[in-house]
Amino acid sequence: MNELSTAITPVVIPRAAHTISRSEISPNALKVLYRLKEAGYQAFLVGGAVRDLLLGVRPKDFDVATNALPEEVRALFRNCRLIGRRFRLAHVHFGSEIIEVATFRAAAAPEREDALDPEAEPGAPVDDEDRAIDTRGRILRDNVYGTIAEDVWRRDFAANALYYNIEDFSVWDFVGGVADIEARRLRMIGDPDARYREDPVRMLRAVRFAAKLDFSIDPPSEEPIRRLAHLLDGVPAARLFDETLKLFLSGYGARSYLLLRRYGLFEHMFPLAAAAFSRPPYAYAEQMLDQGLRNTDERIAADKAVTPTFLFALLLWGAVLREMNERNAGPAPDVAQLLDACDAVLKAQQSRVSIPRRFSVPMRELLMLQPRFNRRTGVKSLGLLHHPRFRAAYDFLMLRVQVGAADREIADWWTEIQLLPQEERILKVQARGAPAGAEGAPPTGRRRRGRGRRGGSAPAAP
Ligand code: ATP
Ligand code: MG
């Protein structure tokens, strides 16, 4: 039903009629644009950069679109690499900044190689040599370059489909993108239902941009999301990992989470977490996630570092506790049981949103340290302070305290002792007396405190 896809001419907004100034464009992106132009090609700044510049926001990155073929782009830049096998993109490197240069494409195509479903049935209906669409309407491969008037139709939202022309500094608007930016609206180009089916990640992008830009989703673009949320199940887990980081670690994580829940998307990314959050004894883990995401957003606003390790700990803690308690009837789950539960949750999680080992291994350590905070007697207990994951685990403990799931007294102890010189730390633990009972036994058994505001019996928590 894409009656619009017959190419048209754009509305051209001359330099004098818009606010984009070259002084706000990355000098490296300008270099790329000018060099393409001087070589006789068309060259445009596209996508989020144009959108953000019109909004007066500093763009995250600068993407370029051109009629030069990838090999032709490479021939112009020494510092250029072609990536992708079937959909080749040129990356022009300037130190840590990469300017992505894409050749205009004729038809809708996945944005990334791994958007292709590795498990797509081999018998998928094929249109022609260069194009294949699977039975659910997802594009499997596409290899056709085209003109700018064709390129515009593969883009997701009209607000993301503006082109800034380096030739005369005008903005080309084929689909009413400028009006959408003024109205702060996300409107899918073409038939929303079909575009989400082609690439379900567009539903996550709708949420991400709505959260980041404080845009509303145009009702016809919003309506299919809840209904099609399950299509995320067919998206490769590695791609969803990347999207998860963009959703939660770009400064608008708390808002993104609320929207993911509103549209039923989160359930398809972190099903075990969603299930745990809806059981009263584990609901506090969702409060921790919410608070943790707010803290993360503040850290990003203050230009401080954030880590996927902590994020995944927050996302999965409820699921890990639930798994642990459902496996053990015993009174006091120990660290080994916690780790077993953690491994089971991680294993199940990998098929939805994969978590690379460089994050899952430290995440496991962070969670494993939680029960160790309970132990505050004996000089050995001080070893915790030197654990490489101490700082993150302590921050996590503070969140548990904040939602009423751990004793403030325990957190205060670790807060104070961190600040003391080693000799005073030793005096302080000695003053608490010898370790109670056998070596390594946690001082408390099954906790009955901190059941939070939502009632229900408290889960056994370390
Ligand atoms: P930001 O970089 O601020 O996160 P962006 O809009 O630039 O946002 P990118 O992922 O950098 O997003 O993509 C650049 C452009 O490519 C988008 O603006 C959009 O036009 C197009 N695009 C990216 N991903 C998709 C997709 N999955 N479907 C359709 N178009 C897409
Ligand atoms: Mg971008």
Image (cartoon, helix red, strand yellow):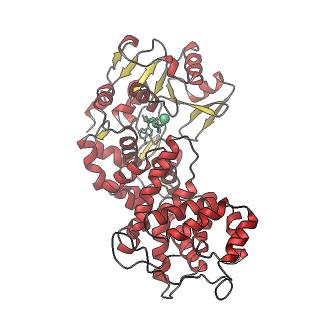
- In the picture, which quadrant includes the N terminus? top left
- Residue at point 57%, 52% (across, down): 307
Asked if 95 appears above or below 109 in the picture, the reply is above
User: Depth check: 98 or 454 in front?
Assistant: 454
Asked if 226 appears above or below 76 in the picture, the reply is below
Residue 215: x, y in percent? 32, 38
Residue 47: x, y in percent? 44, 31
User: Depth check: 359 or 452 in front?
Assistant: 452
Residue 245: x, y in percent? 51, 50
Residue 389 seen in render: no
Residue 280 appears left or right of 379: left
User: Depth check: 383 or 349 in front?
Assistant: 383
- Residue at point 35%, 47% (across, down): 196
Residue 460: x, y in percent? 47, 79
User: Depth check: 196 or 131 in front?
Assistant: 196
Quadrant position of residue 78: top right
Asked if 209 appears above or below 325 in the picture, the reply is above
Quadrant position of residue 288: bottom left
Total numbered labels: 0
Residue 85 appears left or right of 220: right
Residue 426 seen in render: yes
Quadrant position of residue 429: bottom right
Residue 272 appears left or right of 425: left
